[in-house]
Amino acid sequence: MRRLIVAATAVVMALSGCATTGGPASPGNSSQTTNSDLLPGLRGLQDPYPSTYRPLPAEDLAIVGGTILTGTGQRIDNGVVVLVGGRVAAIGGPDTPIPAGARRMDATGRFVTPGIIDAHSHLGVYPSPSVQATSDGNEATNPNTGQVWSEHSVWPQDPGFNRAREGGVTTLQILPGSANLFGGRSVTLRNVPSVSMQGMKFPEAPYGLKMACGENPSRVYGGRNQSPATGMGNMAGYRAAWIEAQNYRRRWEAYEAGGGAGDPPTRDLRLETLAGVLSGDILVQNHCYRADEMMLMIDLAREFGYRITTFHHASESYKIADVLAAEGICSATWAGWWGFKMESLDGIEENAALLEAAGACTVIHSDDETLTQRLNQEAAAALSAGRRAGLNISEEVAIRWITLNAARAIGVDDQTGSLEVGKRADVVIWSANPFSIYARVDQVFIDGARVHDRFDPTYQARSDFELGQPGQENH
């Protein structure tokens, strides 16, 4: 991940009725393997900062007449999506029954997709406008800062969240930076206005552990004349940390086997995060550009008995697409970002398409406060490059790169990412085909509630920071 210096002074906006406190927990997600017998001393893995997210009031709605890309690989022309109680209640062709009392919204000539999911964002931890005081995305004080959680740096009033929502983004994974071998925990957010991080926090979404291989940690710490300073120093640092985490678990296991007699082992927040990966409760989100280094990280995961969920940036994933498909590891990448440092030099625009053709989990992410507003265009560029290379990938498949596959990459694919009955009603209505450069987001719904409407100023939220600024007088 490129180091973003995005920071700043913004605050909450106020969409009318934006209550984000208290509310029932959502069902667990299928991508998260949880340990129901978590050792008592490791209960720090359970969340002491619970979500207070509550969906906004949502009317029952039938979106009719549009071209639907479901996110499951299906395209429905002249389709119908029915939203009831904040969930997808029905989806199908023009004969799909519409419940009495549901309001009809005409989407004729437009496209309907699931909400866009950005699997790699730093909004809130590098907010805009950029100032050093709030550049809180990287605790670059030690090669292993597994004890830090990105949610404790999230500034929910970052205007970037509004901009992302205007681009159709309904869910984001906020990651710490990549200076460290172990950068800390990620958090997944619902992209709704809130005065608190907890009011955005996706209920029961799994945490991720940000790891970084390659040039970043060796440059940052080698420049300080400390380890790691090389690729082999990186690997040695990972291995030492995992050995320490295994020993930490064993100490708690021995304490519990002894019936809890005596003083328990001292809690260690850094090791609790790593132990959470070993137990399957925390997903590994691994910054890694080069194919050879990804292969090393896969071997490292085998050595210590965990699995990698997603390689981020993954510029050379196309070189090992068959391996990634076999391992079930997602690649979150771009189309056009390459060559800005040596490890990204072999990035190609066809990367995503080659991964898709090999059957690997393919994701387009942003890592940028501007690109997150146009993830549909980045996916379109990757799709176009693949087609020029002779890979005939359909739009109904490619939309998964920014919807269902992205949800899988962060462990929430049983709740969002596709328009399927029972899932959260996260929906975007586009003015045209979302793979067209001319497409604009008309409306956005999160849990069935309208949170953006480019035709209605009531649903065009601005942060308090922007109130009174030039050009914002009408908001």
Image: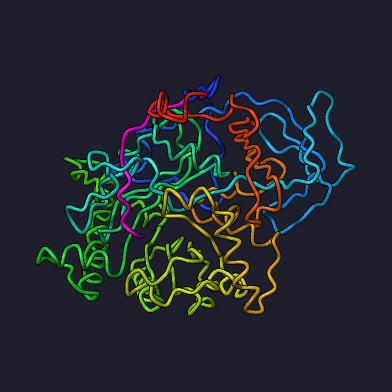
Q: Residue 451: x and y, percent?
A: 58, 31
Q: Residue 327: x and y, percent?
A: 50, 70
Q: Residue 265: x and y, percent?
A: 19, 45
Residue reaching furthest to the top: 17
Q: How many marks?
A: 0
Of residues 93 and 40, which is closer to you in this image?
A: 93
For the stretch drawn in magenta, the main secondary structure is loop
Residue 150 appears in view: no
Residue at 58% in and 57% down: 377
Is 253 on the left or on the right of 85, as rendered? Answer: left
- Whether the magenta-drawn stretch holds residue 429 is answered as no
- On-image quarter of the N terminus: bottom left
Is 319 on the left or on the right of 386, as rendered? Answer: left
Q: What range is drawn magenta here?
A: 1-13
Residue reaching furthest to the front: 470
Is 76 above or below relative to 151? below
Is 226 above or below relative to 437? below
Residue reaching furthest to the left: 225
Q: Residue 40: x and y, percent?
A: 32, 41
The colour scheme used to paint the residues is rainbow
Of residues 373 and 20, which is closer to you in this image?
A: 373
Residue at 62% in and 79% down: 389
Quadrant hosting residue 16 = top right
Is 287 on the left or on the right of 109, as rendered? Answer: left
Residue at 49% in and 36% down: 162
Is 15 above or below relative to 279? above
Residue 144 appears in view: yes
